[in-house]
Image (tube, helix red, strand yellow):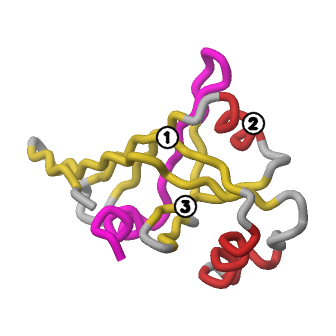
Amino acid sequence: MSKLLDSIKKAGVFFVATADGDEPHVRPFGAVEEIDGKIYLVTGNKKAVFRQLIANPKIEFAGIYEDGSWIRVSGRVRRTDDIKLKEKYLELRPTLQKIYKADDGIFEVFELVEPVGYIYSGTNVTKIEG
């Protein structure tokens, strides 16, 4: 597992920020996985977050660790229709199988492209490499 993904997962729930025109929107996410060395997020295409990511693929998210430090990651997302990738994601996150199927026409997978992550602890800032 990459150091960046490990750092994201350590936070458990993280908060994804998107934009709808000039209006910001933030919501909790918990599912993030690495497949073939790439980091992926998922959602359903009936949700506003899906429409926002399609319209503006720039993304930033943050999570808080138990010790009070936090992580912030920014980048872009790229949607994929790869059915094998969707199947693999659902294997890794079986709880999502209760609401999605790889071929249901609703389940969407986004690759996190060129992510940059930082961990903040008081006045210390550490860039997360790979």
Give the amino acid at mark 2.
Arg
Would you identify the image quadrant in which residue 107 lies? bottom right
Label 3, label 2: how far apart the Cα atoms are: 17 Å
Describe the element under mark 2 as helix, strand or loop. Answer: helix
Numbered mark located on residue 51 in the image: 2
Give the amino acid at mark 1.
Arg
Give the amino acid at mark 3.
Tyr
Quarter of the image for the C terminus: give it: bottom left
Q: Which residue is mark 3?
A: 40
Where's residue 44, x and y in %?
A: 78, 54
The mark that comes first in sequence, 1 or 3, is 3
How many other residues sit within 10 Å of disc 1, few (<14), some (14-19) or many (≥20)?
some
Residue sitting at 32 percent across and 46 percent down? 116
First to last magenta residue range: 1-25
Label 1, label 2: how far apart the Cα atoms are: 14 Å
Q: Which residue is mark 1?
A: 76
Would you identify the image quadrant in which residue 111 lies? bottom right
Where's residue 102, x and y in %?
A: 80, 71
> Is 118 placed left or right of 35 in the picture?
left
> Is 36 placed left or right of 121 in the picture?
right
Q: Is residue 15 magenta?
A: yes
The mark that comes first in sequence, 3 or 2, is 3
Q: Is residue 60 magenta?
A: no
Would you identify the image quadrant in which residue 92 lies? bottom right
Labels 1, 2: front one: 1
